Amino acid sequence: MTDLYQSQRAMRQMRRQAMQRGVVAILDVGSSKISCLVLRFDGSGRLSEDNSIGSLAGQSGFRVIGAATTRSRGVQFGEIAAMQETERAIRTAVQAAQKMAEVRVDHVIACFAGALPRSYGLDATVELEGQEVTENEIARVLAACEVPEYGAGREVLHAQPVNFALDNRSGLEDPRGQMGQALSVDMHMLTVEAMAIQNLVRCVQRCDLELAGIASSAYVSGISALVEDEQELGAACVDMGGGTTSISIFMKKHMIYADAVRMGGDHITSDISMGLGVPTAIAERIKTMSGGVHATGVDDRDMIDIGGETGDWERDRRTVSRAELIGIMRPRVEEILEEVRVRLDAAGFDHLPSQQIVLTGASSQILGLDGLASRILGQQVRLGRPMRVHGLPQSVTGPGFASAVGMCLFAAHPQDEWWDFEAPVDRMAGGSMRRVVRWFKDNW
Amino acid sequence: MRALISRRAKSRAAEGKCDPAPSRLKYRIQRWMLTPGIRMGLRVGLPICVTLAAAGGYLASEARREKLVELYVEARTAFETRPEFMVNVMAIDGAGESVAMDIREVTALDLPSSSFDLDLAAIRELIVGLDPVKTAAVRIRPGGILQVDVVEREPAIVWRSRDGLALLDETGAFVAELGQRSLHPELPLIAGRGADEHAPEALRLFAAARPLGTRLRGLVRVGERRWDVVLDRNQRIELPVERPVAALERVIAEAEARDLLERDVAVVDLRLPNRLTVRMNADAVTDWWRIRQLNESAY
């Protein structure tokens, strides 16, 4: 635990450095594409004093100056499967983005979707030493959370305090400075496979870059695809990517649950490829050009050429009707959505006051998906696109880039995590000298 | 399962499509080139280095360097000898003929010459270094004239020493040799070693001694510390070291009141300032004794 604490703090330090230098790269390592955005921070654009959101939804503090996307290789289910291939793909993306930005990037904030995320809710209550809630008290209550046994070989990716309660008042955003007797906290912790993180770190290091932060793709796509009201009132974001479909539930502007279904757009493509007997590339093209999930009468007569590229011209002039294609795609999409439903039910999503579900990710562009999803997931379904940020090129505004854009927002306005607070004195492993310094700091 | 080891023989060109990923070297080079320091170095440092190297290579040969220096010198001379910068005449104002001759002699300019070659400060030093010159201003007037404005020292006093007669100005500075005393009969005369250094005091003494009129012959510096006023009839007034002017005024007042100096007195000694001592001539002493005897015998 201390180890993680240290490494996460080191990454925070790195990110602070990157912010000072003003340039940081965003790397979205997905199963079907790897995208890289280069951000420049110019320091302005903090939230105004009255807490209202300024121009550009408060995101004017940074600007996207470089963007590049490349086909992903060696990534399966959102995890790195072939390191060298992935490294090359990352290099391609980073190089192109650097070239566009005309600036060298040294720090990278990365996100990935897979690695079996698992959510835990933690809570703790402590009696305050004084009457007033100080930063030290918050660190103490966070440290008092009982960490469940999340299994060997797993690592904590996020640990965010989502709610503070002081005596009988709950729902406090910032309890610092308030008076009370007992402070309690609810914390959301997300763990993933440690191997996935290590592989990603290694890959990024092999590209001569320094990792300044890691985020879960479910979390960051939720940040960008959900509008503020949805985040406040409660909503689920379903990011349908290539290899995985990640789910995150937001409430009171905090993520309270995240999960992932290990199925995505690539499986639809492979179904088409298998069902029609065509190469994956052609199946992908057919899927994106004429795919859908609702068959109508006219689709029976809408014939699609599928060239097999086998060289046999006579036999290769095959066509399928669009209805057949839909017949192949629909069961898989339904399977994915039903799996999502199962996960949402397991998380108790139907007990939330608001049942809003936002579909995003590249696979959410399948025609008619919203109709099908509303039948499976519930009535309040909409298709989400990422928020507009400054300088974002037109080609990167599609729903497939929700997590990349979300990472920009995450980099600009990071959520307080458990390791952002100083560890309380009694837990600190450091020498007595540091303890003395802290004591002085706290008492004067 | 595809082969893990890529074999070069199955070249990428044969497939017709090559890997879009940059090689590690290419990637590093690109990152290098995006580094501000290196970009700056390439944009500014490299041209400077190339220029310096080219210049160094050109100047490596002795003959080329000499030729360059020659060119430079020629260009400079051509510029300096333009008629606008030439000085043709030296005009001297405020000096007598002999002093002007001296100035011309001491500066020893061969005109016409370029105004770049004239060191006006040095010329002025030379001119001021001449004895009869008090101050001098040297400038180049438009029209190629070197204008020298001189203020001569005014002789205020004549100093007789073992080397002969000399004219001094009011500060005691040497002005000129003097052949005969009669050339400047109106100037007061001082004598004695070290007298020139105290010329201002001597002048004050002469001013105080004006009531003595034509009786005053001159001042003598005695032992380089005090003055003797020499009158005709070999009379002397010996003045003290301290405040000689006041002492002289006192003697003169004394003399007017009691006709001291008209009597047969050799020396009026004021070296002890609060005691005036008088030495009489030998005849006067014998006369005085005789008169005293006569008087005593009369009683």
Image (cartoon, coloured by chain):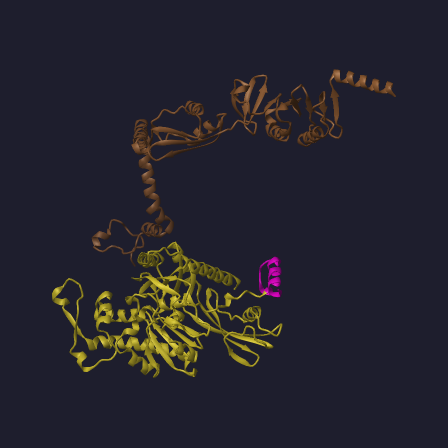
Chain colours: A yellow, B brown
**Residue B226 image point, x, y percent:** 67, 25
Q: Is residue A190 above or below residue B220?
A: below
Q: Please report the residue visible at 32 percent of the width from the left and 40 percent of the height from the top.
A: B50
Q: Is residue B107 above or below residue A404?
A: above
**Residue A36 showing in the rendered view:** no
**Residue A235 image point, x, y percent:** 39, 78
Which segment did they paint magenta? Answer: A425-444
Along the line of sight, which residue is nearer the eye, A136 or B16? A136
Assess whether residue A426 is covered by the magenta stretch. yes
Along the line of sight, which residue is nearer the eye, B165 or A171? B165
Q: Is residue B245 above or below residue A73?
A: above
Q: Main secondary structure of the magenta part?
A: helix
Along the line of sight, which residue is nearer the eye, A336 or A422? A422
**Residue A442 showing in the rendered view:** yes
Assess whether residue A165 is covered by the magenta stretch. no
**Residue B4 image point, x, y percent:** 31, 55
